[in-house]
Image (spheres, rainbow, N blue to C red):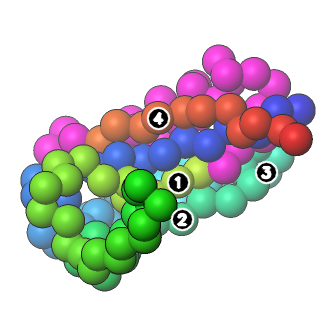
Amino acid sequence: MPRYLSLVRIDENNAPAAGPSPELMQRMGELIEEMTKAGVLLDTAGLTPTAQGTRVRYEGGQLSVTDGPFTETKEVVGGYALMQAKDMAEAVEWTKRFLRTHEEHWTVTCEVREVAEA
């Protein structure tokens, strides 16, 4: 079965300062448990803020290293889910369910892409 990566994109500037509510964390935990039992979820995690990150860029044969935060970036990857699903449609359905766990004040975008197998 193919694997799919759902990249969770958020706007750090508009995300709730307190982070996810306990209710949101509970709903996400329940969905993660369901996905794990269904054999779909291979791995998932949230990521620390960009202020704690470092970018390494290669351009024109040169490397550059920049410490966060990355103020010029509006939308950042805030987490991911690696799934094994029968097809893209199933991976998208699980992703929709994840997005629906959020309260209305959240703005979250997920990009679902199939993992290229060697």
Q: Is residue 77 magenta?
A: no
Residue assigned mark 2: 45
Q: CA distance from mark 3 to mark 4?
A: 23 Å
Q: Is residue 97 left or right of residue 73?
A: right
For the residues labelled 4 and 2, the Cα–Cα distance comes to: 15 Å
Q: Which residues are magenta?
A: 82-107
Q: Is residue 27 visible?
A: no
Which residue has dot 3 on it?
37
Question: Which residue appears at 54% of the width and 65% of the height?
Answer: 45
Q: Earlier in the sequence, mark 4 or mark 2?
A: 2
Q: Are marks 3 and 1 in contact (CB under 8 Å)?
A: no
Q: State which quarter of the image contains the N terminus.
A: top right
* Residue positioned 29% across, 75% down in the render: 66
Q: Residues within 10 Å of mark 2 (few under 14, many from 20)?
A: few
Q: Earlier in the sequence, mark 1 or mark 2?
A: 2
Q: Residues within 10 Å of mark 1 (few under 14, many from 20)?
A: some
Label 1 and label 4: CA atoms lie apart by 9 Å
Of discs 2 and 3, which sits in the foreground? 2
Q: In the image, what residue type sits under mark 3? A: Lys
| Viewer-proximal residue among 41 and 53 | 53
Residue that label 4 marks: 111
Residue drawn where x is 57% and y is 26% of the image: 92
